[in-house]
Amino acid sequence: MNLILSWDLFILAFFGVVVAYSFIIGRNQTLKVISATYIAILCSDAIGNLFARYLASSESFLKLLRLFSIGDSDQATAFFKVLILITFVVLIAVRGMYQFDAEDDRQLSLKMGVNLGLGVLSAGLMMSAIMIFASGGSLIADVAAIDNPFMTIYGESRLVRIMIDFSNMWFFVPGVALVLLSLFHKKTA
């Protein structure tokens, strides 16, 4: 069997790991990961834009980054945003000072379907943010545009195109899911 590594395979593996993890941690923690991802996206984009403005333009700092094969300020900013995104998602999801209470007594198949959907939405939200940041885009400063070095990957991978082209959908659907789950969740006193 000849297995060719590609961005499509990476994205499918990422979705598989995140969905499996969502089944392991359960619905409440998956909701926490989704909300942590939203917070982390905003923070990493803002911090990354500040990094680009004040630190990434420093020639001495870029010399240091070249030791890690980061060639220019755009690459440094993209790397920094993705690093901050992942770090903040983990920190907020693990140490966040809030909890979700979405337990209910519905059928097991419905619970598993909701958890599967939340896992897919969580993976899509994270992957879309990573792809936007890696392509040099910003969600705060301007509309995401594909940077030239990322154009090759964008042209070769159908799933990368889906993640970037439909990034607005990946950003709003998990939020709508949180709202809908809140509306239809029966609170017990």
Image (tube, rainbow, N blue to C red):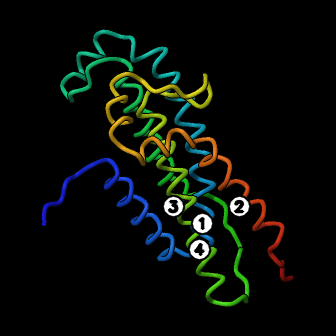
Q: Is mark 2 on a helix, strand or loop?
A: helix
Quadrant (top left/top right/bottom left/bottom right) for the C terminus:
bottom right
Residue at image position (42%, 48%) is 159
Residue at image position (70%, 80%) is 103
Q: Residue 101 shows which numbered tag?
A: none
Residue underneath mark 4: 115
162 relative to 57, above or below: below
Mark 2 and mark 1: Cα distance apart in space: 8 Å
Residue underneath mark 1: 118
Q: Are marks 2 and 1 in contact (CB under 8 Å)?
A: yes
Left or right: 189 as drawn, with respect to 136? right
Q: Are marks 4 and 2 in contact (CB under 8 Å)?
A: no
Q: Is mark 1 on a helix, strand or loop?
A: helix
130 relative to 4, above or below: above
| Residue type marked 4 | Asn
Q: Which comes before the other along the chain, label 2 or label 3?
A: 3
Residue underneath mark 3: 94
**Which percent across, then down, holds residue 25?**
51, 74
Q: Which of 44 and 71 is in front in this view?
A: 71
Q: Which of 92 and 121 is in front in this view?
A: 121
Mark 1 and mark 3: Cα distance apart in space: 18 Å
79 relative to 126, above or below: above
Q: Which comes before the other along the chain, label 1 or label 3?
A: 3
Q: Residues within 10 Å of mark 1 (few under 14, many from 20)?
A: many
Q: Are marks 1 and 3 in contact (CB under 8 Å)?
A: no
Q: Nearer the viewer, mark 2 or mark 3?
A: 2
